[in-house]
Amino acid sequence: EVQLLESGGGLVQPGGSLRLSCAASGFTFNNYAMSWVRQAPGKGLEWVSAISGSGAFTYYADSVKGRFIISRDESSNTLFLQMNSLGAEDTAIYYCAKSWAGAKSWFDFWGRGTLVTVSS
Amino acid sequence: EIVLTQSPGTLSLSPGERATLSCRASQSVSNNYLAWYQQKPGQAPRLLIYVASRRATGIPDRFSGSGSGTDFTLTISRLEPEDFVVYYCQQSGSSPLTFGGGTKVEIK
């Protein structure tokens, strides 16, 4: 059974940093691209970032480019999102999602999400 | 960037009725890489349909997808009580990946 478990969310001040983690199990982690998708309170879904199965290729939405860094650790089957220079517009539930195949793909499994709140 | 416009924003129907949800793309979606998701309150999205018309594993056959190019449709043939939630379309034919704004199906 595929499981994705996010952690690391919380309250952070504007300009601060946070690192999210997503522990994956139930599938061969390095065979699949992974993404982060966020959802601001009461709003729709926004793709944030993706990483290829090998970790060699990364992709970012313009809204986070230069501030967020996606990475993965095959030894622990964990996906990460390092978020820097956070602003109020980054407040959202952040979901970890498994891609069907490559990084340009749809998402067949999602985690439950972790809430990030940026506020002073 | 491909902009996906979902309509209507809210669809008011009764259980047992047929629901037709639209997703229109600002430009053609390559390979018809258009997916549909269902999101219940407080839960993560769930994949329903991919490549415009392929049903994901475990999805009831009352859900069907159709369309190509720029116009796509999700049809729920007979609404069950648990179907009255929010639906999103998503394209992965080109970067960046984008989602539609969602359609809420509510009980009339």
Image (cartoon, coloured by chain):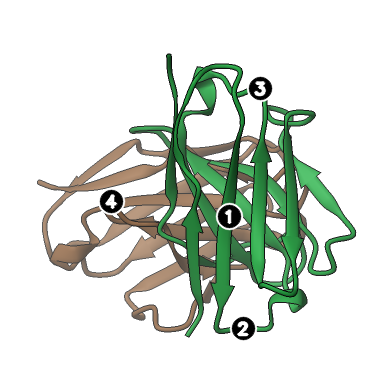
User: Is A10 rendered above or below residue A12?
Assistant: below
Q: Position of residue B29 (x, y in %)?
A: 71, 51
Which chain comes out green in the rendered image? Answer: A
Q: Amino acid at mark 2?
A: Phe
Closer to viewer: mark 3 or mark 2? 3
Marker disc for residue B42: 4
User: Is B40 rendered above or below residue B58?
Assistant: above
Label 2: chain? Answer: A
**Quadrant housing residue B81:** bottom left
Closer to viewer: mark 2 or mark 1? 1
Label 4: chain? Answer: B
In the picture of the structure, the residue carrying the numbered disc 1 is A21
Is tag 2's residue or tag 1's residue first in the polypeptide sequence? 1
Secondary element under disc 1, as helix, strand or loop, is: strand
In the picture of the structure, the residue carrying the numbered disc 2 is A27
Q: How many marks?
A: 4
Question: Between A73 and B97, which is closer to the camera in this rendering?
Answer: A73
Q: CA distance from mark 4 to mark 3?
A: 28 Å
Q: Position of residue B60 (x, y in %)?
A: 34, 80
Secondary element under disc 3, as helix, strand or loop, is: loop
Label 3: chain? Answer: A
Q: Are marks 2 and 1 on the same chain?
A: yes
- Do callouts 3 and 2 mark residues in contact (Cβ within 8 Å)? no
Marker disc for residue A60: none
Secondary element under disc 4, as helix, strand or loop, is: loop
**Quadrant housing residue B14:** bottom left
Q: Position of residue A114 (x, y in %)?
A: 44, 48
Q: Are marks 3 and 2 on the same chain?
A: yes
Which chain comes out brown in the rendered image? Answer: B
In-image side of A120 versus A57 (left or right):
left
